[in-house]
Image: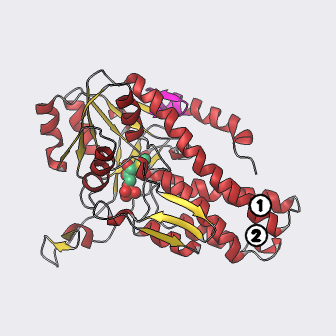
Amino acid sequence: MVKTMEWRQEGLVLLDQTKLPQSVQYITCKDYRRVCQAIQKLEVRGAPALGAAAAFAMVLAFTATVQTTADIKGPYLAAKEEICAARPTAVNLSWGANLMYAAAQKLAAAGTPVPELAVRLTKLAQQIYDADIATNKKMGAYGAAILPAESVVLTHCNAGALATCGWGTALGVIRSAYALGKIKMVFSDETRPLLQGARLTAWELLADGIPVTTITDGMAAWTMAQKGVNVVITGADRIAANGDAANKIGTFGVALAARHFHVPFYIAAPASTFDFNLASGREIPIEERAPEEVRSVQGVPVAPSHVPVFNPAFDVTPAELISGIITEYGVLRPPFAASIKNLQQQVLKEAHSQWKV
Ligand code: MRU
């Protein structure tokens, strides 16, 4: 499985996802601002991958802004804010940056010398990266257990190895279920405007020999009706305390169609994608991107150059359309207010022992 990112002596090496599937190219980010740029351009993308990229960006920011521990509040805090602002919807981004910042504060308060602090922060970022893969494997096992035999799955966008540090969330469940012989077919929505489903999901599943058929977004409801889709699984970018879930634009429509056909609609997402502070999806910030992404496809104009465009990158699926949320702690079921509260308590209990610096 291809690596989305790797920490090396020279900096953070990212697989440039804008070039896929035509070519496999890498970018070396030697400073945190280049990581922010890569996040904005979607060279690295997908909520859990953004969490790990933010953690490595915080390592680069530390070297750039901290000469003495006195710098740890002003310049380092400013760099963290810049990283968090790179994209607004996926909460994993600020989760990764805040975890690193809190660790740096704690180590500085304990009198850790700056060179040792840099080493310990690098180890923590690597730990965040490794933990994401382990988390996805756990989610995969929980999800595979509840998928029907002979699953005909529909998925939207790319919630695979490419959107994480490896294995994937929604595609991780599909990978684990495929290993158990439970996957008959995966329908992958192409996911306009940036085609993560057609370019990335199809590429990833083909590489693993998992049967995949790509459809345009407008074909999802008809495909459910015609092709025996018996389960829908997507990822998420931010889940509110009541279970409302933001994911790639088009997910809400897919969930509505699934409800019409009585097909279960699951989300697969790690605990780091939950925003326990938000009461409902109405409070989730939705990124709006450049009009050019809609007026053109892969740089080729497909609409009048001056037509007004609305380009929200995400939508929010209301909790009542979601059958279950697959996490590394198990499958959360409605009523989500209660099951998410329970998840929050488990996360808090483990927080002290999980991240060692
Ligand atoms: O704009 P993107 O490509 O970053 O959007 C990604 C998605 O919406 C994914 O479904 C989500 O981040 C979950 S990834 C495991």
Image height check: is 71 above or below 143?
Answer: below
Residue 237 at x, y = what percent?
A: 44, 50
Q: Residue furthest top?
A: 149
State which quadrant residue 45 falls in: bottom left
Q: How dense is the environment of label 2, judged by Cα within 10 Å: few (below 14), some, or many (20 and up)?
A: many
Disc 1 secondary structure class: helix
Judged left or right of residue 32, residue 195 is left
- Give the residue type at disc 2: Ile
Image height check: is 314 above or below 108?
Answer: above
Q: Disc 1 designates what residue? A: 105
Distance from mark 1 CB to nearest ligand 1 atom below 8 Å: no
Marks 2,1: beta carbons within 8 A: yes
Image height check: is 189 above or below 149?
Answer: below
Q: How many marks?
A: 2
**In the depicted view, which residue is nearer to us: 151 or 317?**
151
Distance from mark 2 CB to nearest ligand 1 atom below 8 Å: no
**In the depicted view, which residue is nearer to us: 82 or 164?**
164
Residue 271 at x, y = what percent?
A: 55, 40
Q: Residue at x 46, y 66 (%)?
A: 39
Q: Residue at x 36, y 35 (%)?
A: 174
Q: Residue at x 44, y 37 (%)?
A: 243
Judged left or right of residue 189, residue 172 is right
Disc 2 secondary structure class: helix
Give the residues drawn in magenta, as a range. Answer: 326-340
Residue 37 at x, y = what percent?
A: 47, 73
Q: Disc 2 designates what residue? A: 72
**In the depicted view, which residue is nearer to us: 18 or 73?**
18
